Image: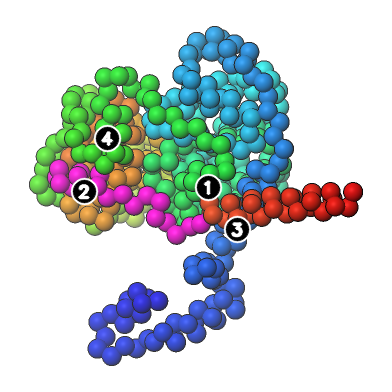
Amino acid sequence: MDKTLALLNQDLTVPAVTEQDVSRVLYQLVMQQSIVVDSGKVYIFQQYEEERLTAVMIAKKLQMPRQPFPIEDELEQAQQVLGITLSERQKQAVRMVFESPLSIITGGPGTGKTTVLKVILYIHGLKCKTTLQLMAPTGRAARRMAESTGNDEASTMHMALGLLGGSDYNLGFQYLEAEFLNVDEVSMVDMHLAYEFFSRVKDSARILLLGDVDQLPSVGAGDVFRQLIGCGLIPVTVLDMVYRQGASSNIPVNAKLIQQNRTNLYMGEDFVFVPCQGTEPAAEMVKKLYLEEVGKYGLEQVQILTSYRVKTAAGVVELNRTLEDLINPPGVGKNELTIGKDVFRVGDKILQNKNTELVSNGDMGIIQDIYEDQDGNPKVQIQFSENRMVRYEREQMEMVEHANAITIHKSQGSEYPVVIIPCIKAFYTMLKRNILYTAITRAKYKVYLVGDWNAVCQSIHTDDSGKRKTVLGQRIQGFYYAEQKQKAEEMEQLKLAV
């Protein structure tokens, strides 16, 4: 209340808003069911109900009788057939999944989450022979999961759940029929999406949630993955040994150091810090490195990741604007289309920013052709991964943007061979550990950090993870133990009756 009053009366000599004024408005909002006040916390009504009901559904799931499968023979067979040797911790993760109706595997990049999932899917095919569904919050993450596991059943959560975008629903959607459900990149799942997911799952379904809890939380409300892990009731296996980049890679080593609040990062050919003082010099260096790396490896192999979208030369908008003519200059015979202030050309790298039936929010593509139909209407052909060619009308081009630079938030669920990251004092509100960690762990082979070392250190030392105002974990505990108590009382009454 004190903070609210201070903000409302800021710069006023005589306060215009009193505590009684705020209380009266809050009371009216509660009566209108616009907000809910619970244990001193103020919620938007919908968010309160989604958090509460999700906790109820998870607690109910955890109460269900366990039907563990003995899988030791299949575990050995899977490793032989797939040519995989699992560590004891990874084997523990596999066993856990077949012992529990709901389980979690978490770990940083390269710790073998995908390898473990391959084994789980193989054993599921041998032992269970029931339907399965793989999904992820973004199209890129879903396709990466499909490619890495060899399973074509992966889709975005929105497509799998019949969510067309925002709060729109596919009215013909059928509830999930799969008996085994795997969700990857769960750190990106917000409270609304979690509610929609758990409300569409069959009671008998086995659920596996995978992700990296140290990455950025969801853009939307909630901190679902961290809360699920923290509730202490869901079986969790933490994978912490790095396999993917190799023992000599500095990327996973530095990722771990950052999580340990240590700034003694290891530098080398695969992890480079380029000092620059000031926003403009840093932006120029970022563009220079980008042009050099694209020249070596190609446009789709290099990505600039930045904390800010606007208001700075090192933000997404300005970097894309100034890079466009450098990376893909106009030329004779190269068609282009102007949409507002943006000019799109054949050869541009673009990012989809809205879910559709054909393309997912976060998908990247290359413009292959710009032309006019027989009626003079402009059309744009964009090629996405897996050689998916999608045609856009002029008005649909509002759903895409240039993607030489994208925000770190947009990069979640993706990987790039080379990543270039500006880190400067001007980003002070975004200099946070999980943002930096998420950015560098998008790189498969090489990271450039460009800017001020003090800004890098500030990012590492600023940990605001777990500070979102959510009590999902506590609610799960409350409903779970209340149900346990009720069952115990019913059993006691039954004994007395007998």
Crowd band around label 4 with a 10 angstrom C-alpha radius: few (<14), some (14–19), many (20+)? some
Looking at the rendered structure, the kind of residue marked 4 is: Leu
The numbered mark, 4 or 1, whose residue comes first in the sequence reads 1
The numbered mark, 2 or 1, whose residue comes first in the sequence reads 1
The numbered mark, 4 or 3, whose residue comes first in the sequence reads 3
Residue denoted by label 4: 257
Q: Position of residue 238 (x, y in %)?
A: 46, 32
Q: Is residue 464 magenta?
A: yes
Looking at the rendered structure, the kind of residue marked 2 is: Gln
Name the residue located 11 percent from the left edge and 43 percent from the top edge: 276
Residue denoted by label 1: 231
Q: Position of residue 408 (x, y in %)?
A: 33, 44
Task: Tell us which disc is closer to us: 3 or 1.
Answer: 1
Q: Is residue 257 magenta?
A: no
Answer above or below: position of 329 versus 321.
Answer: above
Looking at the rendered structure, the kind of residue marked 3 is: Arg
Indicate the quadrant where residue 251 lies. Answer: top left
Crowd band around label 3 with a 10 angstrom C-alpha radius: few (<14), some (14–19), many (20+)? some
For the residues labelled 3 and 1, say whether their Cβ atoms are less than 8 Å apart.
no
Looking at the rendered structure, the kind of residue marked 1 is: Cys
Name the residue located 17 percent from the left edge and 52 percent from the top edge: 425
Q: How is the image coloured?
A: rainbow
Q: Which residues are magenta?
A: 452-471
Q: Is residue 283 visible?
A: no
Residue denoted by label 3: 52
The numbered mark, 3 or 2, whose residue comes first in the sequence reads 3
Residue denoted by label 2: 458
Nearest to the observer: residue 84 or residue 479: 479
Check disc 1 and report its element: helix, strand or loop: loop
Label 4 – label 3 distance at C-alpha = 36 Å
